[in-house]
Image: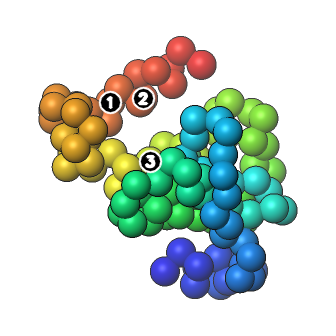
């Protein structure tokens, strides 16, 4: 669905847009404008983690395609895309939070908005 909407928005992605790589940093993956998405294969344990990273990064790619003048060095712009990617990808779904050991169900997504207010 995300790939389809990227194409409809004029940002079609080729076969090499998403790459599995070895990462030295402790990250799951990332999106870089004009380069694509990397998934840190050495930090993935199950298919669901790979799916989650790809969905999250595709939302960043979509935001980059759709939002005029998106500046990744502007903290507010970047934070906006992180909230969208976190929320829309299901990263913050309560079942995932429980699997990560976060057991506070009520208001769990508010933690993100609270920390962003300090930016
Ligand atoms: Zn992100």
Q: Are marks 3 and 1 in contact (CB under 8 Å)?
A: no
**Residue at the disc numbered 3:** 86
**Residue at the disc numbered 1:** 110
Q: Please, what secondary structure does the residue beneath circle 1 have?
A: helix
Residue 62 appears at what percent x and percent y? 63, 65
Residue 48 shows up from this direction: yes
Residue 90 vs 66, above or below: the answer is above
Whole-Å distance between the Cαs marked 3 and 1? 12 Å
- Whether disc 2's CB lies below 8 Å from ligand 1 is answered no
Circle nearer the viewer, 2 or 3: 3
Give the quarter of the figure containing the C terminus: top right
- 106 with respect to 65 (left or right): left
**Residue at the disc numbered 2:** 113
Q: Earlier in the sequence, mark 3 or mark 1?
A: 3
Residue 90 appears at what percent x and percent y? 35, 55
**Residue drawn at 46 percent across, 21 percent down:** 115
Residue 71 appears at what percent x and percent y? 78, 43
**Residue drawn at 75 percent across, 42 percent down:** 72
Q: Earlier in the sequence, mark 2 or mark 3?
A: 3
Q: Residue furthest top?
A: 118
């Amino acid at each position: 669905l995300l790939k389809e909407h990227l194409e409809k928005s004029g940002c079609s992605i080729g076969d090499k847009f998403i790459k599995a790589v070895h990462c030295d940093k402790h990250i799951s993956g990332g999106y870089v404008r004009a380069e694509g998405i990397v998934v840190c294969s050495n930090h993935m344990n199950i298919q669901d983690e790979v799916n989650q990273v790809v969905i999250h990064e595709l939302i960043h790619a979509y935001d980059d395609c759709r939002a005029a003048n998106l500046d990744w060095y502007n903290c507010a712009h970047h934070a906006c895309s992180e909230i969208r990617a976190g929320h829309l990808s299901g990263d913050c779904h309560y079942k995932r939070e429980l699997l990560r050991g976060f057991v506070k169900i009520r208001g769990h997504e508010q933690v993100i908005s609270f920390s962003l207010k300090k930016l």
